[in-house]
Structure formats: structure tokens, C-alpha cells
């Protein structure tokens, strides 16, 4: 007997958020753009924030917390889930962040309107994601653990399945594939 599975489509703006301030939209632009995303009617989820997004807001002199609230509000009102990118031990930064600060970050992001925490470790070390899964769930978010995929002799299906097994033991709600360098293969 086959079981129907739900597939949700997520709109990601990876390069836009990571352009060192060159093309990153400011808060007033995000507010203008959000209704257009809603009008398209084809996305269940939208990546709204995370590391580079919030860092660039700071470079522009904007408050990233205001940006997240303003950007997520119309999406959530339309029933579109919002998602942030989180770098495991580094939180939304490029360096390790204390665990108590990370725990608070998840609570704050949930209060700002973020529904899903997509957490990844570039090394695929599940231990680096254990607290991310825990803190996301404590904050009432969906925990989505991402596998960083690549192509090499050790990165086999069995390798990735063993990582997934650990992440499932931690209680993650979803698994995502993250091809950071565009080198993954089917």
C-alpha cells in the first residue's frame, strides 16, 4: 500500500543574501516584495533570514530584528511558513556562539515570526547540530537538519544515511539536502 507524502516548495534567495551587501534588499524593499511572493501562490515556505541576511542588515545600518519581523509578517499572514538558515555551533554568525546565546536566538527568532530553523554543519558532524535541534523544538519551531552534500569516495548513500539516523535520534522534524558548492550528484 503506498502512502501519500506531502512535498512543500521553498523559495530560497541564497545568492541574494550572500552578496556582501551588493544586492541585498533593505527593509523597505522587502516589504514591497513580500506581497508579490504571496501573489505568486506557489510557495509553501520562504527563506526569510539567517546568517548573511542579518549581517548585511547591520552593514546597512538597519536593525535585522526589524527586518525579520517586517519581512515575515505578510508571508505568515498568507499561511506561508518562514525559514531561517542556522549554522549549528555558529548560530547565525561565522564563529562559535555560546549555547545559552544560541538557545535565546531560537526563542527570539520564533517570536519575530520564523517558523522553521534549517540547521547545518559543513562537516556533517551530527554532534554540532544536536543543540540546534533541541533549541529549535524548545522554541516551538520546526527543526530541519540539513545534510551538506558533496562528491567524494567517502560520501556515499550509506554515509549520509548514518548521519540522518543520528539527526533523527536527536528529534529533528525534517531533513534537507544542502549542496553548498553545487557539486552533489544524484
Image (tube, helix red, strand yellow):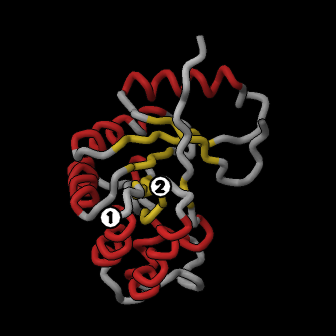
For the residue labelled by badge 1, is the local secondary structure a helix, a strand or a loop? helix
On the image, the x and y values in percent for residue 10 come to 54, 54
Examine the image and state in which quarter residue 150 appears. top right
- Label 1, residues with CA under 10 Å away: few <14, some 14-19, many ≥20: few
On the image, the x and y values in percent for residue 106 come to 27, 53
Disc 2 or disc 1, which is closer to the eye?
A: 1
Q: Which mark is residue 45?
A: 2
Locate the N terminus by quadrant: top right
Name the residue rendered at 36%, 67% in the picture. Answer: 72
169 over 178 or under it: above or below: above
For the residue labelled by badge 2, is the local secondary structure a helix, a strand or a loop? strand
Q: Which residue is mark 1?
A: 77
Name the residue rendered at 53%, 83% in the picture. Answer: 21
- Label 2, residues with CA under 10 Å away: few <14, some 14-19, many ≥20: many
Q: Which mark is residue 60?
A: none
Residue most extreme to the top: 1
- Give the side of residue 26 with respect to residue 4, left or right: left
On the image, the x and y values in percent for residue 89 come to 39, 48
Of mark 2 and mark 1, the one earlier in the sequence is: 2
Whole-angstrom CA distance, mark 2 to mark 1, is: 12 Å
Locate the C terminus by quadrant: top right
Amino acid at each position: 500500500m503506498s502512502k501519500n507524502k506531502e512535498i512543500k516548495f521553498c523559495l530560497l534567495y541564497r545568492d541574494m543574501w550572500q552578496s556582501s551587501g551588493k544586492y541585498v534588499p533593505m527593509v523597505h524593499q522587502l516589504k514591497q516584495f513580500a506581497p508579490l511572493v504571496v501573489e505568486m501562490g506557489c510557495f509553501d515556505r520562504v527563506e526569510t533570514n539567517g546568517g548573511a541576511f542579518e549581517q548585511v542588515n547591520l552593514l546597512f545600518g538597519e536593525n535585522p530584528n526589524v527586518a525579520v519581523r517586517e519581512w515575515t509578517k505578510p508571508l505568515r499572514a498568507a499561511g506561508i511558513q518562514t525559514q531561517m538558515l542556522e549554522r549549528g555551533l555558529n548560530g547565525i554568525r561565522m564563529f562559535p556562539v555560546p549555547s545559552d546565546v544560541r538557545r535565546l536566538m531560537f526563542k527570539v527568532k520564533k517570536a519575530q515570526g520564523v517558523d522553521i530553523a534549517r540547521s547545518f554543519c559543513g562537516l556533517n558532524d551530527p554532534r554540532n547540530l544536536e543543540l540546534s535541534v533541541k533549541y529549535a523544538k524548545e522554541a516551538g519551531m520546526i527543526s530541519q537538519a540539513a545534510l551538506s552534500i558533496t562528491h567524494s569516495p567517502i560520501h556515499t548513500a550509506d554515509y549520509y544515511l548514518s548521519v540522518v539516523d543520528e539527526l533523527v535520534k536527536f528529534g529533528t522534524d525534517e531533513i534537507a539536502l544542502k549542496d553548498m558548492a553545487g557539486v552533489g550528484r544524484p
